[in-house]
Amino acid sequence: MRVVTTAQPLDVQPSPLALLLLGREADPKSERGVECPGDLPSPSDPGLVERARVAKEKLGDKVFVLGHHYQRDEVIRFADVTGDSFKLAKDAAARPEAEYIVFCGVHFMAESADILTSDDQKVVLPDLAAGCSMADMATAEQVAECWDVLTDAGVAQQVVPVSYMNSSADIKAFTGRHGGTICTSSNAERALNWAFEQGEKVLFLPDQHLGRNTAVRDLGLSLDDCVLYNPHKPNGGLTVEQLREAKMILWRGHCSVHGRFSLDSVNDVRERIPGVRVLVHPECKHEVVTAADEVGSTEYIIKALDAAPAGSKWAIGTELNLVRRLADAHPDKEIVFLDKTVCFCSTMNRIDLPHLVWTLESLAEGNLVNRIQVDPETEKYARMALEQMLALP
């Protein structure tokens, strides 16, 4: 290898992409963001827990801390409520006296909280780089282009968009503009039933697996009724005939955590642990869901293990922080992670104790940091889609 040196500094400006990857710039059209504008406490600071407690106590009722189920234990201990993304957003809206909503989750979750809370409340994300790879897989420009493809194929007026909660505010707004609804992993079946009462086809964004699993397992459609739209290929990689025959047009997106589980994972755990029950999230691949004993949302998983008899054995296919917390909460049951490979949600794990301490101390000092704010036009249509979800039969 030849190393080139120079006595003069190179006058080279890093590209926007390089800055983004380094955490020094923000791309407003991406779930990823920037580093904190202040100095983070050291993770090795032995006083972090006390600092968080003192800052939160100083803020009192002015702050309401939300903790998603996939968060680290060190963060969850300071959450006023825990839950999935939509539950937390609703919890925030139910606390109008809280001036600051600190959302320990990821970007799209904080956007949803901002949409549902009042204008007087300020939603804060402790690390703006806490994004969601799934939400990043569907941009507003890509989805608008997809709609043009559907229009050119003569099917757009038959299509009702259904967007998963795990999507950006822009995608939720697109859904509202086109008469669709949002869904969660808990109510996806109801959302699809409603959508098929409105039109002949569904455009499901952005998680292909939740859409496919719900359509086939719950609604009784066939895999042949589903086509996969790839935004990186001309016309989504589909022919006009395919679009006209399809009932479910699935967006080519997935969860980076749940997508890791495989049929081999299921077969392996059954060999290692005789009598184990496999319980997975519906964001898993179809073959994994088909091979599992039970399938359900995060809340379903928690309730199922709460109700399970002592001595029962479970392999859980969802994020590792939650699985570990459930195992600790149920020492009378054998609860293991479905895969042998450790896999946390890397972006969710960006919210750590140093970021939380920095956020709470900044707010306690009167400095508003890392505010997540959805523009009024986007908020208007995104709220329409969310309200349609709340009105689902």
Image (tube, grey):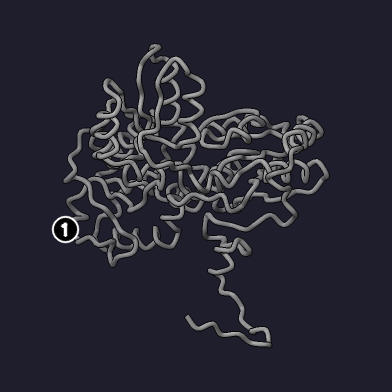
Residue at far front of view: 1
Q: Quadrant of the C terminus?
A: top left
Q: Position of residue 151 (x, y in %)?
A: 30, 60
Q: Nearer the viewer, residue 325 or 64?
A: 325
- What x and y, as percent, mark residue 291? 23, 32
Left or right of 114? Residue 159 is left
Q: Is residue 145 left or right of residue 60?
A: left
Can residue 102 be seen here? The reply is yes
| Residue occupying the point 54% across, 56% down | 32
Above/below status of 292 relative to 159 = above
The amino acid type, in three-letter code, at marker 1 is: Glu
Q: Is residue 177 above or below residue 337?
A: below
Does residue 305 lie above or below 240 as drawn? above
Residue at 24% of width from left, 39% of height from top? 287
Across and down, in percent, residue 116 comes to: 58, 39
Q: Is residue 86 visible?
A: no
Label 1 packing within 10 angstroms: few (<14), some (14-19), many (20+): few
Which residue corresponds to the image point at 77% horizontal and 43% vertical from the top-left? 363
Residue topped by disc 1? 241
Q: What is the secondary structure assignment of the residue under circle 1?
A: helix
In the image, what residue occupies the spot 46% across and 47% down?
167
Q: Residue 135 location, x and y as percent?
A: 45, 50
Q: Which of 98 and 134 lies nearest the eye of the viewer?
A: 134
In this rendering, the answer to whether 296 lies above or below 203 is: above
